[in-house]
Amino acid sequence: MGATKSDLFTKQQNDIANMAKAIAHPARIAILQYLVKKNACVCGDLVDELGLAQATTSQHLKELKNAGIIKGAIEGVSVCYCINAKVWKQYKELFSAFFKDVDNSNSCC
Amino acid sequence: MGATKSDLFTKQQNDIANMAKAIAHPARIAILQYLVKKNACVCGDLVDELGLAQATTSQHLKELKNAGIIKGAIEGVSVCYCINAKVWKQYKELFSAFFKDVDNSNSCC
DNA sequence: AAATTAAATCGTAATATTGCAATATTATGG
DNA sequence: CCATAATATTGCAATATTACGATTTAATTT
């Protein structure tokens, strides 16, 4: 036990859950907000920005890269990160579809 | 170590991360989709629906209740669950605001 | 009151995540 | 080539999450 039983659920359900998991940490939210705000590639200053150790920051960046939501490009000795606009749009749309309006007129609670 | 360093981040960043965490499991996505689909209070059949043990299902329901996104009402010997429309709307809006459109025209990667 | 039913809680095991120091890697400049 | 700088990876400890059997709680029915 301890591991999520992914096989019980649909691909879509697992996809949404995994997307949520990718942003389910304040450091990763902070990274994404910073990249969106800067509206450009950001090289280097993410470690200073967060206040976490370099290794930890690098790990969070890796998770965001694995999720596809950011891209990294080597720029000389440092690495530049930016939002992957295409995947970002997918996230936007999938969450938007998931959180469609609910009709709770039939609800008893 | 092991615990998230919430104090490094803003309340808003922690809030978004916690909301994402609440839905970062396929069983919880399945529960929410089922409640939305049924468009009414659902009593009892959630355990049969998921395929997880009763205790596990109950635990997931508790997390969703803690996050405020669902409500439960005792109905005789069983418990009826439904979407908390107000909180649902908040989630919808917060995620929608977070995933606002990005301009990556200045991006190098 | 006893039996039944549904759900919550407890205890515990397995696994995942978070965080950081230490080390490795990679590119640049001297 | 050697030193430096920036980032990645490794290894490990602390904590969190997931899952389930067993038990408890709470309401209903007999």
Image (spheres, coloured by chain):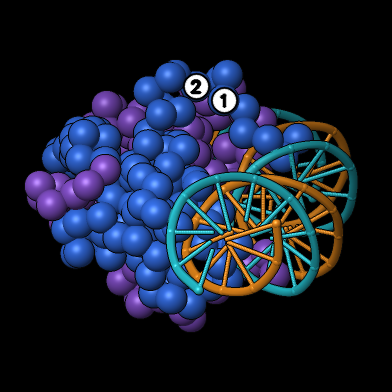
Chain colours: A purple, B blue, C orange, D cyan
Q: Secondary structure at mark 1?
A: helix
Q: Residue B99: where, in percent of width, then height?
A: 22, 41
Residue B87, quarter of the rendered image: top left
Q: Decide: marks 2, 1 in contact (CB < 8 A)?
A: yes
Closer to us: A13 or A52: A13
Is residue A75 visible in the rendered image? The answer is no
Q: In whole angstroms, how far apart are the C-alphas of marks 2 and 1?
A: 6 Å
Q: Residue A2: where, in percent of width, then height?
A: 68, 64
Q: Amino acid at mark 1?
A: Ser
Label 2: chain letter:
B
Q: Residue A52: where, in percent of width, then height?
A: 62, 28
**Circle on res. B9:** 2
Q: Identify the residue at image location x=34%, y=61%.
A: B43
Q: Identify the residue at image location x=40%, y=47%.
A: B74
Q: Residues within 10 Å of mark 2 (few under 14, many from 20)?
A: some
Is residue B18 visible in the rendered image? The answer is yes
